[in-house]
Image (spheres, rainbow, N blue to C red):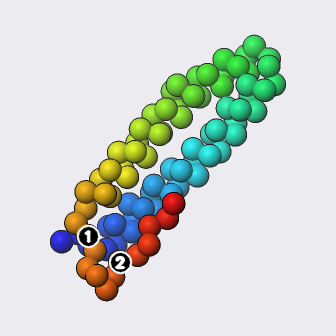
């Protein structure tokens, strides 16, 4: 049986990574909208080198969480969005 603490820690990691995704998305959008050549290049680099990889890792962690055995009925917690 998977310890509830492990499940909780994995969810916390996913939450922090999703926060990072949001910050990164704002930075990328801001750089692209400034329309300076170097800003667009930096935005593209962030998108391909960081954002895409971060998204894949979040997806992988969420898949791991989904494959964990269910928590005992009395200890289940509602998952966040």
Image quadrant occupied by the N terminus: bottom left
Q: Residue, x 34% and y 66% (percent of image)?
A: 7
Q: What x and y, as percent, mark residue 18?
A: 53, 50
Q: What x and y, as percent, mark residue 46?
A: 59, 28
Residue 53: mark in rendering: none
Residue count near mark 2 (Cα–Cα under 10 Å), binned few <14, some 14–19, many ≥20: few
Q: Label 1: which residue?
A: 70
Q: Indicate the secondary structure of the residue bearing disc 1.
A: loop
Q: Is residue 8 above or below residue 51?
A: below
Residue count near mark 1 (Cα–Cα under 10 Å), binned few <14, some 14–19, many ≥20: some
Q: Residue, x 64% and y 38% (percent of image)?
A: 25
Q: Is residue 61 above or below residue 50?
A: below
Q: Indicate the secondary structure of the residue bearing disc 2.
A: loop
Q: Which residue is more in the foreground, 55 or 78?
A: 78
- Give residue 30's quadrant in the image: top right
Left or right: where 29 falls relative to 5: right
Q: Label 2: which residue?
A: 76
Left or right: where 29 falls relative to 51: right
Q: CA distance from mark 1 to mark 2?
A: 8 Å
List the single residue furthest toward the top. 37
The disc, 1 or 2, on the residue closer to the chain's N-terminal end is 1
Q: Residue, x 44% and y 72% (percent of image)?
A: 78
**CB contact under 8 Å: marks 1 and 2:** yes
Q: Which residue is more in the foreground, 45 or 60?
A: 60
Q: What x and y, as percent, mark residue 15?
A: 51, 57
- Give residue 41's quadrant in the image: top right
List the single residue furthest toward the left. 1
Q: What x and y, as percent, mark residue 54?
A: 47, 39
> How many numbered marks does the figure carry?
2
């Amino acid at each position: 049986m998977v310890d509830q603490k492990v499940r909780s820690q994995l969810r916390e990691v996913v939450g922090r990574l999703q926060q990072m995704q949001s910050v990164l998305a704002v930075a990328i959008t801001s750089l692209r909208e400034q329309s300076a050549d170097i800003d667009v290049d930096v935005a593209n680099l962030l998108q391909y080198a960081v954002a895409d990889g971060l998204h894949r890792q979040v997806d992988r962690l969420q898949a791991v969480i989904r494959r964990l055995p269910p928590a005992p009925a009395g200890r289940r917690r509602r998952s966040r969005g």
